[in-house]
Amino acid sequence: MWELIRENKRKSWIIFIGMGICLISLGYLIGAVWFSPDGGIGGIFFALCVWVVLSLVSYCSGDSILLFSSKAKEVSRDVCPQLFNVVEEMKIAASLEAMPKIYIIDEPALNAFATGRSPQKSAIAVTAGLLSRLNRDELQGVVAHEMSHIINRDVLYVTFAGIMLGSIVLLSEVFLRSMWYSSGRSSRRYRSSSQGGGQAQVIMMLAAIVLAVLAPILARLFYFSLSRRREYLADASAVRLDRYPQGLASALEKISNANFDLTSANKITAPMYIANPLKKRGLEKLNLFSTHPPIKERIKILRSMAQGVNYINYLEAFSRVKGKTSDIMPPSALEDSKDVPIRKPFVEQDKKQSIKEKTREIGDLMRAVNNYAFLICLCGLRIKVPPDFKKQAISCPRCARKLEIPLAKVETVTAASGAAIIQKSDKEKRFAQGAESGVYVRKGKGWESFSCSCGKVLQISPIFAARYTTCDRCGRKTEIKTD
């Protein structure tokens, strides 16, 4: 694996050098045009300063910016235990030192991405649509793919390559717009320079304009080439971790067949996702500027793996589908000829759910993450109250019983745990009292919550199966019993 990572780094640096040449050349020509031929060095310095500043911002807080722009919400184990279990299993399989943070994006599109500058500080984000449509095998395949990006150091390299691409595009846009808005003054200046023997300056200006147009295109080619290569390698590493290529293949099929757009994605962040969120139907053959390999091709490769899940097995399947050999893996990775058998699929223990029921369940999960309050009336109806609800009480639509809303408690709930407050009527007081004494008795199979002795509201999801839950504020453990 370490040789694989080193080879990955080497090829990435080759691509970085190509993008760096574009950046330096563009900076030199822009400086030479605006500050005379001797200003080229200053232009290079300015271009590098732009890249360094953006890189520092990205390195220090790039993951936070990406998660914020994607509107991702961090979730706790109590809110989404199955996703936590899957991530934890893949973390152990990958021998990762630290557990990645887990986020959910409240969008119906099917997608996922990993972020973080190192394996010790990383995060995995999945969309609500992905959780609602995938079974456990498929979800584990997606998580294994994202975990592979983390252990292969793909996140850091793609992030810095994206920053370099953004720097080139920024310089090109500023230069071309400035030339457009000052075209009259520039034409008179260069006409005067030409009459005084400044033909070299005119040629320099034309070269700068041409490079300002071509540099972003060349940089995108380098950037997308880096992204496509890493997707193949992440697929190969994912099936090695998960040992079930059919799960990832099935997940990719569902992702490719989904009709929802990922509204929070853009051209720079698109390579971070497991599948291109900007890919339009009918454009599968236009792969030169694609951030990802053809998804149908990736599925065929995974479906062709019937003998095992070693790197050799993936490369053989890759060669059969592509009709040619490839250097996506170093020779040392192929020296490990030990057989890694394909595991059997998981047997679903939970009851079969329709897509509508699963979507409703994920909808409740996202409401909890977004600080909704769940009031449980005596008649059994659960009322979902938004966090900006200002009244102190609400009437039950079924029985007209008035339920008080403990607003102070709603305001103290963090986005990570959500807000689900059970109305403390006479019948329900014993549940709250039980929680204060370290025991909470569940009333049903839906979303429930209770207050810890420290005042923090804790939430239990429908699929919560552990014996205890731990308050992330005071560390107190509460035993969960069934009524």
Image (spheres, helix red, strand yellow):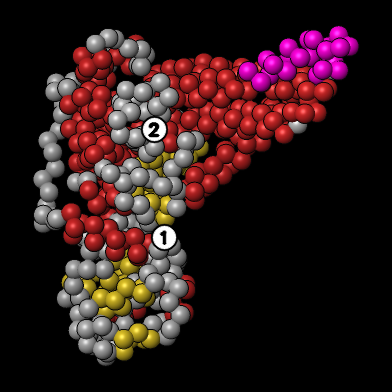
Q: Quadrant of residue 477?
A: bottom left
Q: Quadrant of residue 8?
A: top left
Q: Is residue 53 left or right of residue 347?
A: right
Residue extent of the magenta highlight = 190-210
- Res 443 seen here: yes
What type is the residue that disc 2 sits on? His
SS under mark 2: helix
Q: Is residue 159 magenta?
A: no
Residue 136 horizontal/vertical position (percent): 20, 45
Residue 449 horizontal/vertical position (percent): 31, 72
Work out whether residue 180 or residue 57 is closer to the camera in this orientation and state it: 180
Q: Residue at x 34, y 60 (%)?
A: 366
Residue assigned mark 2:
149
User: Principal SS element in the magenta part?
Assistant: helix
In the displayed structure, would residue 180 be above or below residue 392? above
Q: Residue at x 43, y 43 (%)?
A: 265
In the displayed structure, would residue 416 be above or below residue 278? below
The disc, 1 or 2, on the residue closer to the chain's N-terminal end is 2
Q: Say the numbered circle drawn on residue 416.
A: 1
SS under mark 1: loop
Residue 9 horizontal/vertical position (percent): 47, 21
